[in-house]
Amino acid sequence: MKTQFLVAFALCAAICSCGRHSGWTPAERAIITGPIPLRVLTIYDEEDSLVLRTPCADLTADELSSPEFAQLSEALLATVTDPSQDGVGIAAPQVGLSRRVIAVQRFDKPGEPFEVYANARVVGCRGGKEPGPEGCLSIPGWRGDVLRYRDIDLQYSLPGASGLRDTVERVQGFTAVIFQHECDHLDGVLYIDKTVPGLLREDQR
């Protein structure tokens, strides 16, 4: 499977914003610049669980155009694709940052690239929900069936000349499921909160 790291827009924005106040805290910078892969939080640790259950804050225009965001993008991509994780998506709270940032593998695009999205939200859904198996890097050892839409509208922010520029994109199929899973993380929701009753099971892969 080919993997492409599409963070060029973040890197370019970071170059243009050197010296600008970005709003990231020292604790956030310490995580972002830490060893790669970043440590993935799990529900089995009490402090980790509190972070995973905390709703995340949006990024401002300055934060999205900062070197820290470029570094975070690269760190999330390196973490989710690391052989120790080998995931299809990851959210910033899973590495200890209560920020509305996710990285998702786009199985609906040529080359199935990983892409990073800031201020991501599911803002529209079409059709009915369908059951499908899910796992989570923050809940290792378990899988469960969850009802999800296969046709959604995703909203996210890009840096623009006069601040943030919000974009809405239609996403379908399995990639839509991944986006719903990761956006749930940004609201402090885990897939086990939505598992079809009786269908949470040990991962036998």
Image (tube, grey):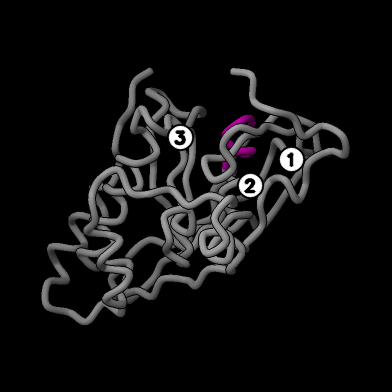
Residue under label 1: 149
Residue type at mark 2 is Gln
Dot 1: within a 10 Å radius of its alpha carbon, few (fewer than 14), some, or many (20 or more) residues?
Answer: many
Q: Nearer the viewer, residue 15 or 50?
A: 50
- Marks 1 and 2 in Cβ contact (< 8 Å): yes
Q: CA distance from mark 3 to mark 1?
A: 17 Å
Q: Earlier in the sequence, mark 1 or mark 2?
A: 1
Residue under label 2: 180
Residue under label 3: 105
Instruction: Reply above or below: 51 against 86.
Output: below
Query: Which range of residues does the magenta coloring cover?
Result: 173-178
Dot 3: within a 10 Å radius of its alpha carbon, few (fewer than 14), some, or many (20 or more) residues?
Answer: many
Residue type at mark 1 is Tyr
Question: Which marked residue is nearer to the observer: mark 1 or mark 2?
Answer: 2
Give the structural element (helix, strand or loop) at label 1: loop
In the rendered view, does 76 fall on the left or right side of 137?
A: left
Instruction: Reply above or below: 204 against 84.
Output: above
**Residue 194 in the image: x percent, y percent?**
77, 47
Q: In the rendered view of the protein, which quadrant contains the C terminus?
A: top right
Determine the image quadrant of residue 196: top right
- Marks 2 and 3 in Cβ contact (< 8 Å): no
Determine the image quadrant of residue 92: bottom left
Q: Earlier in the sequence, mark 2 or mark 3?
A: 3
